[in-house]
Image (cartoon, helix red, strand yellow):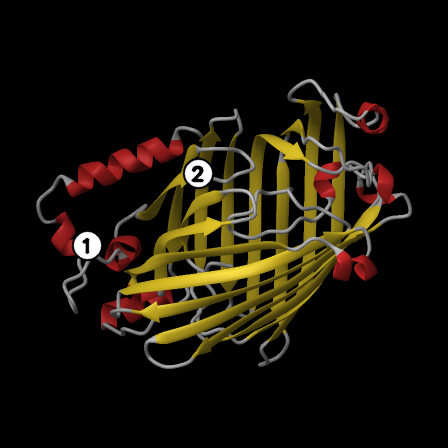
Amino acid sequence: MKKIVPVMLAGLLWSTAHGGFMEEYMTDPEDGMLDASRYLSQVPMGFLPVPTVITEPAVGAGLGMAGIFFHESEEQKAMRVRGEAQAIIPNNISMVVLAATENGSRGAGFGHVGFWRDDTVRYRGFAFYPDFNLDFYSFGGIEPRNPVELNLKGPAVVQSIKFRLGESRWMAGLKQSYRLVDLSLQETVNLPNAQVEAAVNRFLQDKINREITTSGAGVLAEFDSRDNPMAPQAGLYYSGEYLWYGSAIGSDVDYGRYTLKGLNYWNVNRHFNLGLRLQFDGVESSDSASLPPYVLPFVDLRGIAAVRYQGRAVAVAEVEATWKVTPRWRINAFSGGGRAADTVSDLSEAEVANNVGAGFRYLIARRYGMIMGMDVARGPEETAVYIKAGSSW
């Protein structure tokens, strides 16, 4: 897989070297602006390259590259030939991803999203092989003063399929998750408190230097009235899912995980959009103190390191305002907060982790309503930069 992206980039550079390529495939005839719609829909193996300068606080600075492919149905191709200009949802979207950072973390993955049978069936699947070094701040309910850096290595697969209920906006389906993790210490544990150190070491002795399989399956339901799932400007998306992990389906640990999510988009006027994200994640287990640290949910916000704020109950809210400067260019500002605790009842007393940031977007493929851009976000500890393709959430 590591050879795929360089080959694709070489093909793109070769194509652009020919004089008429930019004018023929990368320029919108309506406004003369840079636009990849014709390239993505008409050039065989045409893809949208998404280079990323990684500044994720959890893994340090690094570089990544994604290639996103859009696959149209025969009907959609006919619409293009007829010159119909409305934004469409491609029948399939595929992507390949490579990334590496300064702390030794690296990974490669492949993903696929399908909108099948006139969008009455939706599929989403992703296979990834990470080799990540992450700082953890909580172990079985014990919080050391200093984080402990662990290495997580092994394959992961997540996929879901949903079916539309009649002609409604509702969909229901199934979800499956599999992960095999070789967990090890990235560095020697050196904690100042002897009592805490002993407790953390006892916890780690049962978890490190062995492979742990988490295998889960469950159900999901969603309501989706967004105008474009890839880059919505108006509409609602509400979903709920529950996954059970148990020995009967190959899991080494038994627990349940549930997620409730609400994404709200309001097109206030032709220049201004407002978005609101609400999310709650929870884990339930008869022996939650023995769960591997990486299975617990965490506060997932731009500007806040992954797994920095973890718990068995996590609540997040974020608002984003977008101003359309021109039909192509947009600027956005956002702010939010999250809490993590051992129980739902403890959330009201938990520490609040806030973020604030701003960025811009460019309509890179008008045919698909696809946008790309950059965000700069500040969290409680650090500032991070993100290159975004599609929706912020």
Q: Which residue carries the number 2 mark?
A: 54
Q: Identify whether 334 is placed above or below 69.
A: below
Which quadrant would residue 90 be assigned to in this image? bottom left
Residue drawn 37% across the image and 56% down it: 359
Q: Earlier in the sequence, mark 1 or mark 2?
A: 1
Residue drawn 45% across the image and 35% down it: 98
How much space separates mark 1 and mark 2, taking CA atoms? 29 Å
Q: Amino acid at mark 1?
A: Tyr
Q: Position of residue 279 (x, y in %)?
A: 64, 62
Q: Residue 201 vs residue 186: left or right?
A: right
Which quadrant would residue 70 be assigned to in this image? bottom left
Q: Residue 25 vs residue 74: left or right?
A: left
Choose between 78 and 251: the one closer to the eye.
251
Q: Are marks 1 and 2 in contact (CB under 8 Å)?
A: no
Q: Which residue carries the number 1 mark?
A: 25
Residue drawn 69% across the image and 30% down it: 146
Residue drawn 75% across the image and 35% down it: 213
Say if residue 90 shows up in the picture: no
Say if residue 56 shows up in the picture: yes
Q: Identify whether 391 is placed above or below 224.
A: above
Q: Residue 72 vs residue 142: left or right?
A: left
Could you say which disc has been placed on residue 337 in the image?
none
Q: Position of residue 171 (x, y in %)?
A: 63, 71
Q: Position of residue 82 (x, y in %)?
A: 24, 73
